[in-house]
Amino acid sequence: MLGQAMKRLLVCSEPDIPSANMRDCLLDMMDWEEAGRDDGAVMMRQGDTFMLSSQRWHVDFEDVLEVAGKFGADPDMVIFMSRHSSESGRPALTVHPIGNYHGNELGGRPRELVRSAPGYMTDALRRISKLNDMDGTQVCFEVTHHGPWVDRPTFFIEVGSDASNWGNRHAADILAHVLASNKGSENPAVVGVGGGHYAPRFTEAALSLKADFGHMVPNYQIEGRDDEDVSRMLGEACRATGTKLIFLHKKSMKAPQAARIKDLAASEGLEIVGSSDFDPLDQ
């Protein structure tokens, strides 16, 4: 049964092949009822879960809640089903929060973060890891990046990483099963700071510890920024995650950089935590 404990809106961009494939897999998996159609958009409903299909591209869909409202949907959370692109082309199944620490070249608002859904997003990552049976496919978080702006907790779930992978129906089926069973988690929420775009340390921690990750601030967002800007990013990432805990990837930075993050976090009333602060995840 979809929609466990939270009203969700799943968003499909029909021109996006993995997005349409995930929608089709979900439609095949269970019975849905049509909640309406208008101006090329179609809304389906299964319990407390709505699924909106349209020609709109994800990062530009700033009015997704307004469109959903036309069909009677007022979700607690939004999940965009999407493709993932990378130069490596490596097969990947990913989840990530959204928003912009600085510019908004890919939608959203500059210097504003969309509220994350740490319990649901991290639960999705764990379910992907358990269901993934494709050799060579990377399962990981991505750090916070791109739009759209949405006034609800939101995350993306994606098939990557290029045209040779986007049409993989089995990959879409895995993510559809994840969405169908995604019940969330109630572990402490944390913000990840440090590392690179694909957040290997935070992915590893989420798969082994009772910690749920929300926004993540990679080193490339911090490098070259003054203390005021870094403090702003740390504070906003924590507020948009609903936590005061920062999981610091110390090994990804030099000791003076780590000390700087600790000092700036303390000045914002935030707490630095690590793997020893969390119980092992029940397997």
Image: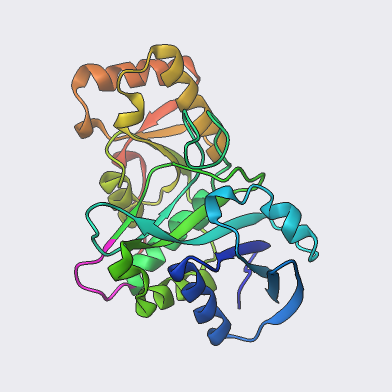
Relative side of 269 to 201, left or right: right
State which quarter of the image contains the N terminus. bottom right
In this rendering, the count of numbered labels is: 0
Q: For residue 108, what is the image quadrant?
A: top right
**Prevailing SS of the magenta stretch:** loop
Toward the viewer: 271 or 253?
253
Q: Which residues are magenta?
A: 132-138
Q: For residue 72, what is the image quadrant?
A: bottom right
Residue 42 in the magenta stretch? The answer is: no
Measured as percent of width and height from the top left, residue 174 is found at 40, 75
Q: Is residue 151 above or below residue 138?
A: above
Measured as percent of width and height from the top left, residue 86 is found at 29, 53
Residue 224 in view, yes or no: yes
Q: Is residue 38 above or below residue 66?
A: below
Relative side of 78 to 170, left or right: right
Toward the viewer: 146 or 135?
146
Residue at 53% across, 80% down = 24
State which quarter of the image contains the C terminus. bottom left
